Image (cartoon, rainbow, N blue to C red):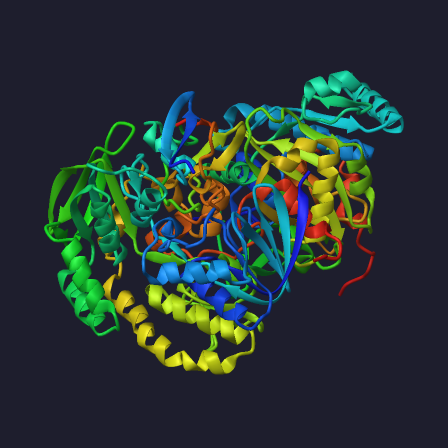
Amino acid sequence: MNKPAEVVIVGAGIVGAACALELGSEGLRVLVIDEGFPSTGATGAAMGHIVVMDDSEAQFAITRYSQILWDDLREQLPPAVEFDPCGTLWVAADEKEMAEIRRKFDYYHERGVNAEILDSQQVRDAEPHLRAPLAGGLRVPGDSVVYPPCATGFLLQKARDLGARVIHGQPVAAIGKGVARLADGTIFAAGFIINAAGQSAPNLSPGINIKPRKGHLVITDRYPNFLHHQVVELGYLKSAHSLTADSVAFNVQPRKTGQILIGSSRQYGAENSAVDESILARMLQRAFEFMPELSSLSAIRVWTGFRPATPDKLPLIGPSPEDPSVLVAAGHEGLGITTSLATAKLICAQILGQRPAIPIQPYLPSRQMAAEAHV
Amino acid sequence: MSESVSVRVNGKPVTVRAGATVAVAVLASGATCRASVSGQPRSPLCGMGTCFECRVVINGEPQRRSCQVLCEANMEVEANG
Amino acid sequence: MDSVKHLRFDVAVVGAGPAGIAAALAASDSGKTVGLIDDNPAVGGQIWRGAQSVPRHSASSICFERLNKSAVQIIRGARVFHAAKGELAAESDDSAIQITYGKLILATGARELFLPFPGWTLPNVMGAGGLQALVKSGLDIAGKRIVVSGTGPLLLAVAAYARKSGAKVIGICEQTTRSRMARFGLKMMLVPGKAVEALRFACDLRGIPHWTDCWPVAAFGNRRVETVRISRQGQTSEIECDYLACGFHLIPNVELPRMCGCRLRENFVEVDEYQQTSVPGTYCAGEPTGIGGLELALVEGEIAGYAATNWEDRAKHLFAKRARYQKVVRILKDAFPLRPELKNLARPDTLVCRCEDVPHERLREHGSWRAAKLHTRCGMGPCQGRVCAPAAEFLFGWEIDSVRPPLFPVRCSSLAAIGSHSAPQN
């Protein structure tokens, strides 16, 4: 083994991988430890949509920042990552939603995000398989899609090229006070430890509030040219918004292979990874309402995943109040792929004592944790 | 009852015995069933519906396993191998 | 959108090969309602494929006649893709089918093991059973040159059948050793009826070279196989052929039993003496409980059918017969183990996953099936790993992970049907 690491990262999902690359690029020695193999958690189940969201200023800031970083990276991404600048098409079912489309357009426009309002005919020209009539839509051409496991693999490989070390198959039992201890007792000392353990993050940093939010996805056989954009109903925002109810929302994605990915569902309190037939049915029925021909496509696989969700729907990026040597980088809900690169930048800035590119306050873990004195 | 049945594979008429599958008609016509994702020609492997190599378009419907479909008169089969 | 058919049976039998047919007939004797579900357009499974169109005085003809006269409801062309307690979901070409049952008998049979070697993806390289199935489905091989290779008794049956169908069988390449093959022959003589079968094979195959310690190394051709290179006792030679039939014995179709929650041992379904699995009310018969051939499948099916309809006496009566044919499982296992040389046939660029065109060198990088799937898409195509997962297991020693619905690619509308049906009606 070479010189000891200066930063230990727990979790080789896309967030951990992005952090490894960013820190490595700044000359730091990095060790990444994963309990399984890379992308075993939410990263491996994720849709891979890179999307600018407007739920709040803080959400917009981090998604926009990260989307630009993905664009900067795109030339370097190998074909396996399947980067596809297909853009997002938000669809409005009625006039009320159309008003929301206009609001969204204004919001993006004011902040320099390219968007285009489409009327009922234009939205069907953009996606011929959408049913008529829809009120219209909003096309956001700057959004894109990647294949998350290979994106993570790419980031990790680049990190390795810069000297990072990656350990697989080793669960981490505890972190803190400059030390990460594996379940088998091995100890790694480092100046900083990054908790990018996704769903398991609260086990390592007690006090942070991350709960699993189960989702379902269906992938079809190859139907090239069936779909051109990631198409999402505006109701998706209501679904992502709700903290308690089980919900479904129409969300489909074209893969570069020509396969269609169909989502989405959200359930709280469902900890079992088995496919839930009844919410799957609801999710599909919702999709058929927007794109009837989906019903006759061949579905090859169904899987579930758990989005690590926080109560205020913003990720945790920053020091644990109990131990400033531990930085949390977790709780990204459905935006982990999108915001992975920005998360890495923000973490890096904090470690190096540099000014972060966007305000960091909304994401600090301290906002969640009760101020308690510890001996 | 007829002892043979005629279908069209890539526009070409092919006659097979009654009860034969579309896979057999494709092979009899000299075509291959499908092109793989990297463009290789593929034809049936398992003969029993589990390998999916025999997929063709039948009467406009894609992704049909030809070894599991019996030929019917005037079927239009596109075998894009 | 699809309609959803709702069917209800006292006993549902999945798989209409010999085991399933025997089970359905036995269950039907009780007067209970029996449904027999199969993916293929006609019943018979693999070994009895097309047997209905060839009338003979044989076990298959007798069974088909009884089946047609019975009250068993046969559902053809329906693939079962989901199982929950007391219910199956299946899909046919025109609808989704919801089947509720009192008892379930799984007779899902087996499929061939395919191992990758250079050129194995060429058209007209097929499974051994694969070639036979196609010939039974109408493929004309009269005058064609065929090499039969791989391992197992199926090679003999296929070679005999091909010859009877007018093909020129150039040779049979069996990878097992000569001594194992000889022992196999001797031991099978002790199984009732097998001596006659062996003599018949010897007759049918007279003059066709049978090479042991022999396996295919590569297949060559432009758009279809034209030549196969084989290895025989350390030497390679090339044989021109029109078809290369290649299969490495059978692996059980345990995906549905797994989804039903049945316990497996060494990848076979565990059953008690009544063919009942670890799930009460769910039975399993035939190859998924152990690769043992036709006669064993028939008697296991019959036992399951009687047991599922509470006719234990009749079932018990068959135990001795089953014991006689049970020996075949051990005999086959001992006779045809796969030799390690077969792990080295694939070159770095030889495809392992045919649905997604993933070559050996890309898989080698990963430490587990799950990691390989996620990063290369191997096993994520429409065959859902049925071809490549067993090969990967053999090549890399990976354990293949659990099953999820759909067990088979199905229309999205059928997937939606399984979670959204109302109370089933008859």
- Residue A46 showing in the rendered view: no
* Position of residue A34 in the picture relative to residue C391 (left or right): right
Residue found at the far front of this picture: B1
- Residue A233 showing in the rendered view: yes
* Quarter of the image with the N terminus of chain B in it: top left
As rendered, which of A57 and C336 lies closer to the eye? C336
Residue drawn at x 44%, y 40% is B52
Residue A370 % position (x, y): 83, 56
As rendered, which of C415 and A334 lies closer to the eye? C415
Task: Work out whether C120 lies above or below C214.
Answer: above
Residue C348 % position (x, y): 30, 39
Residue drawn at x 31%, y 44% is C131
Residue drawn at x 26%, y 73% is C192
Task: Work out whether A287 lies above or below C330.
Answer: above
Residue A319 % position (x, y): 71, 48
Residue A89 % position (x, y): 72, 25
Using the rendered view, name the quadrant where residue A113 is placed: top right
Using the rendered view, name the quadrant where residue A349 is placed: top right
As rendered, which of C92 and A102 lies closer to the eye? C92
Using the rendered view, name the quadrant where residue A129 is placed: top right
